[in-house]
Amino acid sequence: MASIKIETVLKEKNRMGECPVWDEKTGHLVFVDINAQKVCRWNPITGEVQSMTLDARVGCVALRECGDYVVAFGTRFGLLNWENQSVTTVSHLEQDKPNNRFNDGKVDPAGRFVAGTMPEEPISGVWEKQQGSLYTLYSDCSVVKQLDQLGISNGLDWSLDHQIFYHIDSLTYAVHAFDYDLQSGKIANRRLLYKLEEEENMPDGMCIDTEGKLWVACIDAGRIIRLDPETGKRLQTVKMPTPRITSCCFGGKDYSELYITSASDGLSQEELTKEPHAGEIFKVTGLGVKGIPQYSFAG
């Protein structure tokens, strides 16, 4: 097997790099910097990064079938037009929870955008419990709440047969599985899939490979772990050059490259001196597995 290679592809420091998405149509890596309120696009051929600043923290971005993007920012769902740098809000949620914001999200195999909320990071590092929810934005722009009483709604993906939904609530330090009704988008029957070990710290973003195995970013543990959802066992650990590893996605022309985002926010000035790679975006090759293309929002 080829040896694993980790390289920085984007040195520009993200405050909270998150939600990488490979845009096959353009050959760009799209991602967000939550705390900088930006959606960014990186061109791997020219190395150029374009960005668009929104008026609130942007938790996640996903592809649209029409070629643009769908975003969850603040507590709103929006349609983002890259050409004219505009966002149209299609739904405003949780207006009774001023401290909440959207976090991670992804499009399901039927073309719906699924994204969850969390309370804003407090100064003390102690999050309010059970303030988060998970929502589905349907193609007609209607919204349904699927789960509530979540701590920090985070990484999500679907099994290759589309019958199981995988979801991370970071404050449970675990990955859970649910039954997924692809026709309706309904989520039911939560069960524990994997509880993170102490040195793996807190789970963040997640993606799936063509073998149906999950790749989970471990924030503050500087690693990505590969899990077998059928056995609930960890198969592999990839140690990264900086601690605050936030999310991952497969990309490149054959989806054999794993792109990984990281954060520089949350580290003290002293820690930042010791962590020159904090906030960079990495590419991992030689894993011997490939990912699947991201689904696109049908609305």
Image: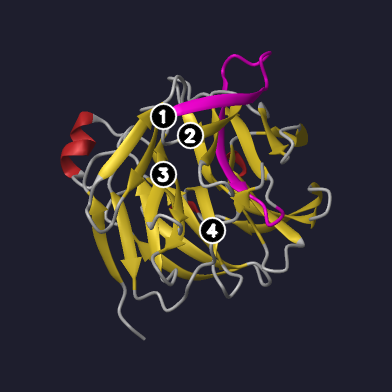
Instruction: Determine if the magenta segment contains residue 104.
Output: yes
> Which residue carries the number 2 mark?
81
Residue 206 magenta:
no
User: Gap between marks 4 and 2, in whole Å?
Assistant: 25 Å
Residue 111, numbered label: none
Seen at 51% across and 49% down, the residue is 205
User: Which residue position is annotated with label 1?
Assistant: 85
Give, as a three-letter code, the residue at label 2. Answer: Asn
User: Image check: 291 left or right of 34?
Assistant: right
- Left or right: 279 in relation to 200: left
Q: Secondary structure at mark 2?
A: strand
Please identify, in this view, whether the residue under mark 4 or under mark 1 is nearer the observer: 1
Kind of element beneath mark 3: strand
Q: Secondary structure at mark 4?
A: strand
Q: Which residues are magenta?
A: 85-110
Q: Are marks 3 and 4 in contact (CB under 8 Å)?
A: no
Q: Which residue is mark 4?
A: 207
Q: CA distance from mark 4 to mark 1?
A: 28 Å
The answer to whether marks 4 and 2 mark residues whose Cβ atoms lie closer than 8 Å is no
Question: Residue 110: x and y, percent?
Answer: 72, 54
Q: Which residue is labeled 3 in the image?
A: 31
Q: Is residue 48 visible?
A: yes
Residue type marked 4: Cys
Q: How is the image coloured?
A: secondary structure
| CA distance for labels 3 and 4 | 14 Å
| Amino acid identity at mark 3 | Phe
**Three-letter code for the amino acid on which mark 1 is drawn:** Gln
Front tag of 4 and 2: 2
Q: Marks 3 and 2, how far apart in space?
A: 15 Å
Establish if 262 lies above or below 197: above
Element under disc 1: loop
Q: Is residue 60 left or right of residue 181?
A: left
